[in-house]
Image: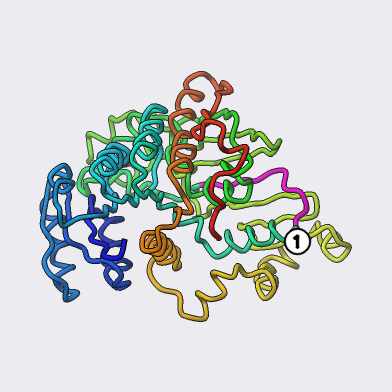
Amino acid sequence: MKNIKIGFIGLGQRGYSLLKSVVLPMGRAKITAVCDIYEDRAKAAADAVVSSGDAAPAIYTDYNALLKDENVNTVVIAAAWEVHTEIAVKAMRAGKAVAMEVGGAYTVNECWELVWAYESTKVPFMFLENCCFGRREMMALNMVKKGLFGTVVHCSGGYQHDLRVEISSGRENRHYRLRNYLSRNCENYPTHDLGPIARILNINHGNRMLTLSSTASKSSGLHEYILKNRPDDKFLKDAVFAQGDIITTVIKCAGGETVVLTLDTTLPRYYSRGFTVRGTAGMYEECTDSVFLDRAEDIKHDMDWRKSCSGNAEEYAEEYEHPVWREYIKSGVQGTHDGMDWLEFKTFFDCLENDKPMPIDVYDAASWMAVTALSEQSVAQGGRVTDIPDFTNGKWAFGLDDIKD
């Protein structure tokens, strides 16, 4: 595809940010249509396109109408979680290439529908998991491939982000998180932590996730926050939130590895993805940004590691910086989320223009998103071990297209 014409669907905080701070300044595609159920958001996005010097895009409040627009051949989906896969399936069946934002699935069946739509149409699809393009995540992937950590046996990560203000402001800001936290109890946002781990463990490329078990703590954080900070909000004061404050999910893989995911968004804390890789010869830990290897000079600091060696990962960057980031730093990091969003869309456009497989494909999307629906079942059943479907129908064992680094 040489002439990319994008229809943006969903222009809240995330969609508008991608449009204004990444896609427009990148200049590799025309934004020919914008869509949001709230007309003011769609108009603000259209104004941003015009302010950039491009022609005014068509404005829609119904994504079905946008999908009929012949001046759109690609869609970016950044709408509410509930409709991501619904829109993506219809877009592929309409022949529009898809870049779909992250979030968890509501049912396992919707993940299958996503796979079936792709397999029946072969329309390009990329899952927009930007953390797979994070600098340290990619450096750790490079270190794993070079054998620095030996045999990887365990990884952990989390979406650990104090979202109490965002969630409790959901009605006035028209944000979907509030209704989800009121009605669901699950690992609702697994892919920021699972995506980079899946690449390291070769999930769907010679390995796969077999089972998961999820448990939820009680829900107290939002209620107490609201009593303290929004005492006049009768609706929220009386609300009973279904979502537990801490959700812990344990995944077992076909290769014998284990993965622990932690959702932690309704208690006071600092931001972290908790990205950790453990192998027979060493480890990387995001919280201390450090590399610890099985050698005498590291082992002697095991009891005072935070004090003596915290932050030493930068010392390893000279040798192990991922080649993509080495070049990116030289050319100048751009865009939002520490440059991850820019790399993500650069990759999407490169693959579209050169008819190459997407590095984060429909099988990845289905596998990672299914964790949400399955965790909801597991939590409701007291942490019951739940099978994870094989969305590749056995192709994982032989390797799908190699992940492009």
- Who is closer to the viewer here, 98 or 166? 98
Which image quadrant is residue 213 in? top right
Residue situated furthest top in the rendering: 381
Which image quadrant is residue 175 in? top left
Location of the N terminus by quadrant is bottom left
**Could you say where residue 94 lies in the image, as x and y percent from the top left?**
23, 43
| Amino acid tagged 1 | Trp
Task: Characterize the magenta stretch by its predominant secondary structure.
Answer: strand
Location of the C terminus by quadrant is bottom right
10 Å neighbourhood of mark 1: few (<14), some, or many (≥20)? some
Q: Which region of the structure is painted magenta?
A: 148-158
The answer to whether 23 appears left or right of 285 in the picture is left
- Who is closer to the viewer here, 169 or 347? 347
Q: Residue at x 49, y 33 (%)?
A: 391
- Who is closer to the viewer here, 43 or 118? 118
Q: Residue at x 67, y 67 (%)?
A: 313
- Who is closer to the viewer here, 43 or 296? 43
The answer to whether 43 appears left or right of 19 in the picture is left
52 in magenta? no
**Could you say where residue 358 lies in the image, as x and y percent from the top left?**
44, 53
Q: Residue at x 41, y 38 (%)?
A: 104
Residue 269 sits above or below residue 178 on the image? below
Residue 373 sits above or below residue 339 on the image? above
The answer to whether 36 appears left or right of 371 in the picture is left
**Could you say where residue 393 lies in the image, as x and y percent from the top left?**
52, 31
**Could you say where residue 174 lies in the image, as x and y percent from the top left?**
21, 46
150 in magenta? yes
Badge 1 marks a residue whose secondary structure is: helix
User: What residue would you read off at disc 1?
Assistant: 305
Q: Residue at x 31, y 68 (%)?
A: 21
**What sort of colour scheme is used for the picture?**
rainbow
